[in-house]
Amino acid sequence: MPETRRSTIVFALTGVILLALGIRTGVAAIAPLAPSMDLDLAMEGLPLGIIGTIPPIAYALAAWFAPWLAQKVGLETAAIAVGVLGALAHVWRGVSPTFLSLFAATAVLMVAAGVGNVILPGLVKLYAPHAIGSVTAAYGTAMAVSSSAPSFFGVWMADLAGWRVSLGAWAIISIVGAIPWLLVLPFAKRRGLAEAELAGGLAAGPPKVSLSKSPTAVAIMTIFAVSGAMAYTWFALLPQLLIDEAGMSVEQAALALGIFTITGLPMSLIIPPLAHRVGWSSILTGVAVACGMAGMVGLLIAPTFAPYLWVVLLAFGPLTFPLALTLIGLRTANHLSALVLSGYVNKIGYLFSAAGPLVVGFVLQVTDSWTVSVLFLMAVILMEVPAIWVLARERSVDDERAETDASAHLSN
């Protein structure tokens, strides 16, 4: 590999943060504006729910082809494409004349964001291999900030200039996020030959072995999937549960959801550096399981006793999301392996995440009781328990795949 200049690293790390800022702004931008949006369908109930299901499905879809795309055109070019396509989709949403047009624009925007989700761990592994924890913490925090920013500023912009400008304005962050990668491209081209040789070497070895044969890869995918399922389910249903079971008012339930959401911000800063320490990835997974279970037990047996405490405990359940993002870089040998693992984790993880709130909502509808739904979520979080022991082994995904490949050759 050619030597990377300090200026190139600075541009690349700036690009990582800006890319992370840009890929999540579209997720929560519509909901606060829905009552004032003038389209052919009223933006409430089912139409709003349909829009809300797009992100996890689009993320999973993008994860199928993002590793191939990034290896074909390069990580940096893929980052530029994410920024440009995201900017165009934001503008498209702002000028959409119908619900169908808004749906299509949102789907394009979320697919672009899904590609960004996949390539970010590879970019971190490539440009900050010795600072994966701190850089992952930085871009994870940027994602958390960008997810919440439209809720705070979207209505304000709509009051000033209308909802169309409010939706389209987020294109600025996306297009700015592409600029640092334009500056990094010359280095990326010089790296092309060396990377092609590395890719060729990988193609002849472990990549022939499915990632599902690597216990560490499966463990990372599992904690990612469970964290997503828990987070998406509580985002959608926690206020209603607290109103029904804890006797909260609408305002109190909204405050509880805010507490649940904001707890993720410090975790995105604290968890990645801790994951660097030997043994801590399994400890953190155990903490997530214990806290999530404790919060759900509290809601089941004493919902009115300390509801805000149960909410805080629930919020610690998805701490395995920033942990999984960090482990993608830590448990792989190079940025290409990190890219492939990221695609695998995102692909299965987001499909599972999308199913979480749907299953819980269906069970609630059929049983008319929160008990069975919460028991189902307890079973879901217990799926992380085997990962505690797998991650404690501190194994590399590449080493496990190589061993499986060697065993297969010996058996033949």
Image (cartoon, rainbow, N blue to C red):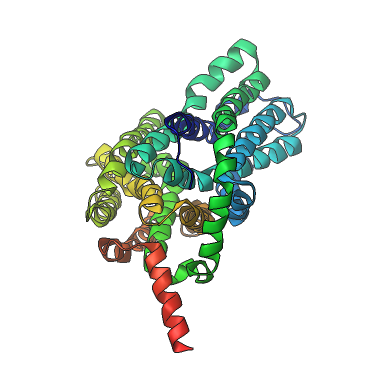
User: Is 340 or 390 nearer to us in this picture?
Assistant: 340
Position in image of residue 400 (x %, y %)? 38, 69
| Residue 267 vs residue 273, the one in the foreground | 273
Of residue 92 and residue 131, the one placed in the foreground of this image is: 131
Question: How many marks can you see?
Answer: 0
Q: Is residue 246 visible?
A: no
Which residue reaches farthest bottom? Answer: 412
Is residue 147 positioned above or below 155 on the image? below
Residue 224: x, y in percent?
41, 53
Residue 89 seen anywhere in this rendered image of the structure: yes
Percent x, y of residue 77: 61, 40
Q: Is residue 134 above or below residue 61?
A: above
What is the quadrant of residue 401 in the picture? bottom left
Residue at screen point 65% across, 16% down: 162
Q: Residue furthest top?
A: 160
Which x, y percent locates residue 37?
67, 25
Q: In the image, 263: left or right of 409?
A: left
Quadrant in which residue 163 is drawn: top right
